Amino acid sequence: MAHGSPNIDFGRRTDDYGRHRPGFPESFYDRLERYFTIDGADALDLGTGPGHVALTLARRGARVTGIDVSTDQIETARRRAAEQGLDRTATFAVARAEQTHLPDASFDLVTAGQCWVWFDHDAALREIVRLLRPGGHLVVAHYCYLPGHSPIAARSEQLVLELNPGWTMAGWDGMYPKHIERLPRHGLKLVEQFCYDHDQLFTHESWRGRMRTCNGVGSGGMTDEQVAAFDAALAAMLATEFPQEPLVVKHRVWAVVTRKQEPS
């Protein structure tokens, strides 16, 4: 359940998250390697969900701990780690970003992928600074589809609003400029903010699964009956208006990289 959002529970669609929600493209991790080396790093992934970021870091050689408040998501992440042979280097636990109960100065890298908006920012930053070693990095990043640049995403959001007209996050542009001023606090220094667009490919099935994870749909915005009705309407719309696969849905990567300052 998200901080400040009692109706949101991403664990409700954990199978869809694990199977259909796309992780960040490999180019995102290539970009991070400009600032630090992932191979050999001790990393903590906050709000890990089904472990997309954590497992990619592990594949690139990091020793990763992933935490999330959702027991369902953590179980999915553990299962996926075992299936991919990464359960020795990627471990998962139920915990809050604001209070991890992990040892001081135990990580070279902390990541928060697609989750920072749900945290108590000041409390999370104090905890992150406690956990980071001097010179360690915090990366806050988002990977969002762009309804302003994708007819498929725009039409899908129209269907969401028909069943959930109170949803307030439609039409998002994938940009989080307020992070730039909020993140360099408590001893963190801004290294860089970057963003770029990426064409993400989906089948009809995977796009439907991705949309079922939307916070206006299956993560809390609709009842199970409404989710089923939405999914049926989305399937019909895709078959009629976008029959050819794969679907190309433009996404935006947006990230801020910060570094814990060395002691003077």
Image: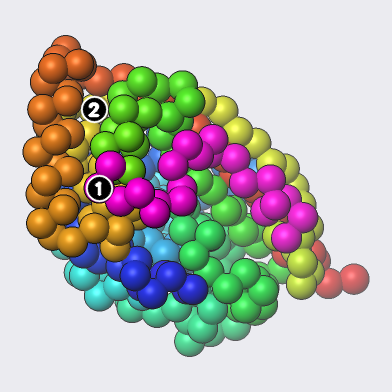
Where is residue 90 shown, x and y percent of the image? Answer: 32, 63
Q: Is residue 113 magenta?
A: no
Residue at point 67%, 53% (across, down): 179
Q: Which residue position is annotated with label 1? A: 163
Quick one: SS at disc 2?
strand
Label placed on residue 60: none
Of 210 and 191, which appears nearest the observer? 210
**CA distance separating discs 1 and 2:** 23 Å
Above or below residue 166? Residue 240 is above
Which residue is disc 2 drawn over? 202
Query: Which residues lie in the magenta part?
Result: 162-182
Quadrant assignment for the C terminus: bottom right
120 relative to 184 in the view: left or right: left
Residue type pointed to by label 1: Leu
Location of residue 42 in the rendering, given as x and y in whole percent from the top left corner:
50, 64
Q: What kind of element bears circle 1?
A: helix
Asked whether 163 falls inside the magenta stretch, the response is: yes
Packing grade of label 1 (10 A; few <14, some 14-19, many >=20) is some
Which residue is rendered at x = 9% and y = 38% of the image? 232
Residue 24 shows up from this direction: yes
